[in-house]
């Protein structure tokens, strides 16, 4: 198992390279990274909002792009994205 800071897109890329170079089958990738920030839109910390977008969307999309070829070459395989209820329901003071 490899643990990385998913906000570091170069680290995500390096992890994919390490898996590819290991010359082993990748049968599952579970993406469970996510962050949350409370705050009204007019007061939310822009850096925190950036972290929410990078962690919850940008890094997930980058991981899918980087790991998908490895998963396809090992098919049958699984790409699993886990999320929270916050992705399905709006909450007060949750602009980010």
Image (spheres, helix red, strand yellow):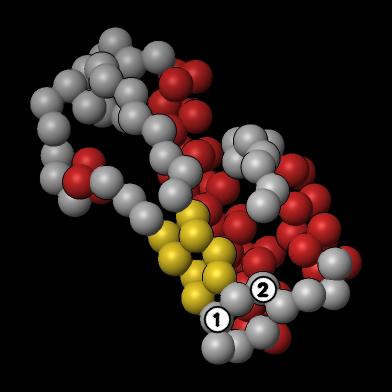
Q: Please indicate whether residue 70 sits to the left or right of residue 57 in the image.
A: right
- Measured along the vertical axis of the image, is residue 20 above or below residue 30? below
Q: Residue at x 42, y 60 (%)?
A: 81
CB of mark 1 within 8 Å of CB of mark 2? Answer: yes
Determine which quarter of the picture holds residue 16. bottom right
In-image side of 45 versus 7 (left or right): left
Q: Position of residue 39 (x, y in %)?
A: 25, 17
Q: Earlier in the sequence, mark 1 or mark 2?
A: 2
Indicate whether 76 appears above or below 1.
below
Residue 77 image label: 1
Image coords of residue 59 (percent x, y): 56, 48
Instruction: Say left or right for 71 vs 84.
Output: right
Dot 1 alpha-carbon crowd within 10 angstroms: few under 14, some 14 to 19, many 20 or more: some
Residue at the far top: name it: 43
Q: Is residue 62 above or below residue 52?
A: below
- The residue at the point 55 percent across, 88 percent down is 76
Question: For the view shown, which residue lies furthest in the right direction?
Answer: 21
Q: Nearer the viewer, residue 87 or 1?
A: 1
Q: Secondary structure at mark 1?
A: loop
State how many labels appear: 2
Tell me if mark 2 has few (under 14), some (14-19) or many (20+) residues whose alpha carbon lies within 10 angstroms of its own. Answer: many
Q: Residue 23 at what x, y percent from top left? A: 85, 74
Does dot 2 land on a helix, a strand or a loop? loop
Q: Tell me residue 19's x, y (percent).
A: 77, 63
The CA distance from mark 1 to mark 2 is: 7 Å
In-front residue for pair 30/48: 30
Q: Quadrant of residue 17?
A: bottom right
Whether 73 is drawn above or below 65: the answer is below
Quadrant in the picture for the C terminus? top left
Q: Is residue 25 visible?
A: yes
Disc 2 marks which residue? 26
Q: Is residue 9 visible?
A: no
């Amino acid at each position: 198992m490899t643990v990385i800071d998913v906000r570091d897109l170069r680290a995500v890329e390096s992890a994919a390279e390490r898996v590819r170079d290991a010359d082993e089958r990748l049968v599952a990738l579970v993406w469970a990274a996510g962050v949350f920030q409370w705050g009204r839109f007019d007061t939310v910390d822009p850096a925190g909002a950036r972290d929410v977008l990078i962690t919850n969307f940008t890094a997930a999309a980058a991981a899918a792009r980087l790991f998908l070829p490895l998963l396809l070459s090992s098919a049958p395989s699984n790409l699993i994205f886990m999320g929270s209820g916050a992705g399905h329901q709006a909450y007060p003071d949750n602009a980010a």
